[in-house]
């Protein structure tokens, strides 16, 4: 056992996370006093009680956010002033790196090394990036006739409801908070009931950084209670949602049943990773797909779970992937050397094992993995799993598994590869591997996905938009384009009289 591992376990043992909501700048219990128990997926240890937010708590948070918006305590400040506060917020996130990383790992099971090296820095960078952007974005004057002046300005939408999942709890929250707060909105954030702790700490850090009370509230709770109440609330102007396609549909229903609030959905994926026989470095392609698929226990919306390989190179490709996969075998997430942690809970474990059974019963060949692991810990672990001989019609190719399971589908021609890749209700991400520049461009153009990678899969930056085609959602997180979701465009006409 390494010293670092001992440290993290000792720190984890001492941690008593606060599960109360943050409403109007204060930590509060749910109005009716109800809580739910939050267990760690690492070993099922009880982390503590969490406020079980209901409609009354959501209403209090939305009222606070509305009051903060209407009196201009945040939206009315000059962009440069908002920038300073958000920069301090980003600095505080980095200063609380160890605590936030530990909370994230304990809450949803990812390896501590990635909470430290990926989740915390990406969260801080996102907040800092939008802070820096906000006093550099100009509005417009339309090229109209000289008798008038038409100003096209962006204004914050008002109160934003942010509802986020558990796979990257802090990063997903930051993708909403960064642009929404920078633009001057007030936010009510509903984290997943499976990962509430870092969102609550983020709200405290924002207050410490000088964000006025009421501008950023967090109501933990269940989707069908706090989530539904937030999405139905008449005083919420926009919903920034990340989660499953199933819940995304509900968001649209909630909007139509209430105030037609704007709904921006970032939903599931079933991303295709297409390898042609003219790509020379097969080993790099195979190692990349293993790394990307098994990162975060396969609980990534953009995981390359459909691996399309030209039939002439497929045997060799599968051989390399099958040799790579065991390197990602799950271990204790609190050990600094661990590369794959625990699935988020027993439900997710059962879902993933159910898909593995479905793959086997539909005739796919499991070349490595396929079993639960570390059951003796009380936690929820699955071996990195590779299926060969997958048909695109199989359940494991059509549905999002959200676990460490990839399926290899063989193809013959370029047209066939494109047709299979696009034959999915999802369109979040895709990649094409080819040394032929014409083919690479041709196929990249043909793939119906919000992000297409060529000869790599890992490149990512806050400067580029992220989101999906088809049932992977609408709107885009990240980049300056995210401001579109959290601002209204206003046209103001001024008459200019002739002298
Ligand atoms: P989920 O849809 O079950 O839950 C997401 C959030 O919605 C949670 O906060 C949950 O409490 C809430 N919710 C659930 N039911 C609700 C209801 N009836 N009314 C209101 N709110 C409700 O999704 P999940 O299991 O937490 O997350 C996994 C999903 O998220 C996957 O499908 C994954 O692909 C997707 N995801 C997408 C992106 C992206 O950027 N496109 C990023 C990360 C995750």
Image: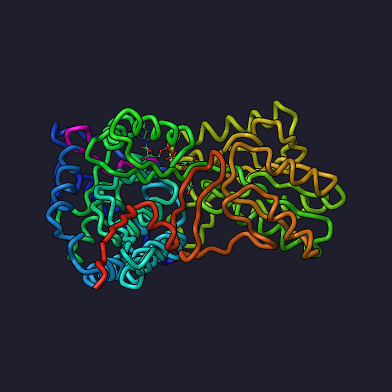
- Residue extending furthest toward the right: 312
Q: Residue 61, how many percent across, how many down?
A: 18, 43
What stretch of residues is rendered in magenta?
44-58
Q: Quadrant of residue 334?
A: bottom left
Q: Residue at x 68, y 61 (%)?
A: 454
Please give left or right for residue 446 compared with residue 145 in the image. right
Tell me the quarter of the picture where residue 248 sits: top left
Would residue 175 be found to the left or right of residue 309 on screen?
left
108 and 428: which one is in front?
428
Q: Relative to 30, say whether 214 is above or below.
A: below
Report whether residue 473 is seen.
yes
Asked whether 336 falls inside the magenta stretch, the response is no
- In the rendered image, residue 89, in percent from the top left (x then y), is placed at 26, 66
The answer to whether residue 10 is seen in the rendering is no
Quadrant where ligand 1 appears:
top left
Taking the view exactly as shown, the residue that stands out farthest to the front is 499
């Amino acid at each position: 056992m390494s010293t670092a591992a001992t440290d993290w376990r000792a720190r984890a043992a001492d941690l008593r996370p606060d599960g109360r909501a943050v409403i109007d700048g204060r930590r509060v219990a749910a109005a009716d006093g109800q809580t739910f128990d939050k267990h760690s997926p690492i070993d099922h240890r009880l982390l503590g009680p969490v406020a079980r937010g209901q409609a009354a708590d959501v209403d209090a948070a939305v009222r606070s956010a509305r009051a903060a918006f209407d009196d201009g305590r945040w939206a009315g400040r000059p962009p440069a002033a908002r920038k300073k506060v958000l920069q301090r917020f980003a600095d505080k996130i980095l200063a609380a790196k160890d605590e936030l990383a530990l909370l994230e790992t304990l809450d949803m099971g990812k390896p501590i090394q990635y909470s430290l090296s990926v989740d915390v820095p990406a969260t801080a960078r996102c907040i800092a990036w939008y802070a820096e952007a906000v006093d550099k974005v100009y509005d417009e004057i339309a090229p109209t006739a000289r008798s008038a002046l038409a100003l096209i300005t962006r204004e914050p939408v008002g109160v934003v409801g942010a509802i986020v999942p558990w796979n990257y709890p802090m990063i997903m929250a930051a993708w909403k908070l960064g642009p929404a707060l920078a633009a001057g909105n007030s936010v009510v954030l509903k984290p997943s009931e499976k990962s509430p702790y870092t969102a609550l700490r983020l709200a405290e850090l924002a207050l410490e950084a000088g964000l006025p009370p009421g501008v950023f509230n967090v109501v933990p709770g269940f989707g069908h209670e706090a989530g539904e109440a937030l999405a139905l609330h008449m005083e919420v102007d926009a919903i920034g949602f990340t989660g499953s396609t199933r819940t995304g549909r509900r968001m649209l229903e909630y909007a139509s049943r209430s105030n037609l609030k704007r709904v921006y959905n970032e939903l599931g994926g079933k991303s295709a990773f297409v390898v042609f026989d003219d790509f020379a470095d097969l080993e790099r392609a195979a190692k990349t797909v293993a790394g990307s698929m098994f990162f975060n226990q396969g609980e990534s919306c953009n995981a390359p779970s459909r691996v399309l390989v030209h039939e002439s190179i497929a045997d060799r490709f599968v051989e390399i992937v099958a040799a790579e996969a065991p390197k990602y075998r799950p271990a204790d997430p609190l050990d600094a050397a661990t590369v794959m942690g625990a699935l988020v809970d027993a439900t997710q474990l059962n879902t993933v094992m159910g898909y593995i059974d479905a793959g086997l019963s539909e005739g796919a060949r499991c070349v490595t993995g396929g079993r639960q692991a570390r059951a003796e810990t009380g936690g929820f672990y699955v071996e990195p799993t590779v299926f060969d001989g997958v048909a695109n019609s199989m359940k494991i190719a059509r549905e999002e598994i959200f676990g460490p399971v990839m399926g290899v589908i063989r193809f013959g021609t370029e047209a066939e590869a494109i047709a299979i890749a696009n034959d999915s209700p999802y369109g979040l991400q895709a990649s094409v591997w080819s040394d032929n520049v014409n083919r690479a461009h041709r196929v990249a153009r043909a793939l119906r996905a919000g992000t297409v990678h060529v000869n790599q899969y890992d490149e990512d930056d806050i400067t580029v938009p992220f989101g999906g085609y088809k049932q992977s959602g609408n709107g885009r997180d990240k980049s300056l384009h995210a401001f579109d979701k959290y601002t209204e465009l206003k046209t103001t006409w001024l008459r200019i009289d002739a002298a």
